[in-house]
Amino acid sequence: MQRFTQGFYGYAFAMAVCLAGVLAFLFVTPYSTTPHIPRVDYTIDVANMRRAAPYQVWTPEPVPAGWIPNSSRMTDAKGVVTWRLGFATAEQKHAMLIQSDERPAAEFANRMANSDRATGTVQIAGETWEQRYREDKNQRSLVRLLPDATLVVTGTAGWDELTALATSLKQQPKPAGSPAPTATPVPAATPTATG
């Protein structure tokens, strides 16, 4: 037995035992080919938006089946409150809800959609949304200009999935004691060329 614990033979024996253990571990560990998508909890951003935004916040209720919220970013810069909420969809595409009171509203919508050209309109839950499509980026967008905010639903997801997200949107009430949202007129849209 001593020859297995000394010199080269001891080293080789120890390595073989370790290698056998690693192989056994790999053999019994399940392997998944499905990519791991990080999930974020955006409830804190919803609460912060409800307090900070001068408009009523829109959230998906419920989130479409099989979707995973994977990004949430709220910004409050110089009195402009914007929230971007991203999802991995059931079809493994990307969809994002963007809302803001940035002005001019039309310029904000153009920037978020990467296009200033409407390809049509669609009725979703009784409301009119403008459709835009940026072919070179494979980006579809639904745009709705409200008196106090702009809503953009955009991404590489198909029209059916973007429509599902827009359909799920519900307005959240302002917290008790918050000032009521003030409606400001939306200036007339001035088309600008985008590259």
Image (spheres, helix red, strand yellow):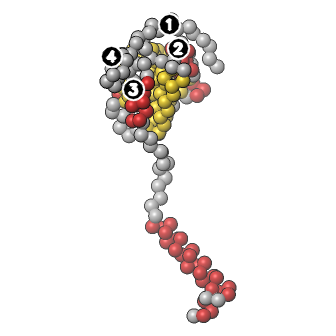
Work out how far the residue at label 3 is from the one at label 1, CA to CA, in angstroms: 25 Å
Give neighbour class at mark 2: few <14, some 14-19, many 20+ (Cα, 10 Å): some
Q: Which amino acid is tagged 1?
A: Pro
The residue tagged with tag 3: helix, strand or loop? helix
Q: Going 38% across and 40% down the picture, which residue do you hit?
A: 66
Establish if 175 lies above or below 183.
below
Image depth: mark 2 or mark 4 in front: 2
Which residue lies under the disc numbered 4? Answer: 126
Q: Are marks 1 and 4 in contact (CB under 8 Å)?
A: no
Q: Which residue is mark 3?
A: 50
Alpha-carbon distance for marks 2 and 4?
25 Å
Is the residue marked by circle 3 packed among few (<14), some (14-19), or many (20+) residues within 10 Å? some
Measured as percent of width and height from the top left, residue 9 is found at 65, 86
For marks 1 and 4, the one nearer the N-term is 4
The residue identified by callout 1 is 187
Q: Position of residue 118 (x, y in %)?
A: 51, 15
> Sequence order check: which comes first, mark 3 or mark 1?
3
Mark 1–mark 2 distance (CA, rounded to whole Å)? 9 Å
Q: Quadrant of the C terminus?
A: top right
Estimate how packed mark 1 is, as few (under 14), some (14 to 19) or many (20 or more) residues with alpha carbons within 10 Å. few
Q: Residues within 10 Å of mark 4 (few under 14, many from 20)?
A: few
Q: Decide which of tag 2 and tag 4 comes sooner along the chain.
A: 2
Q: Is disc 1 in contact with disc 2, using a CB cutoff of under 8 Å?
A: yes
Q: Earlier in the sequence, mark 2 or mark 3?
A: 3
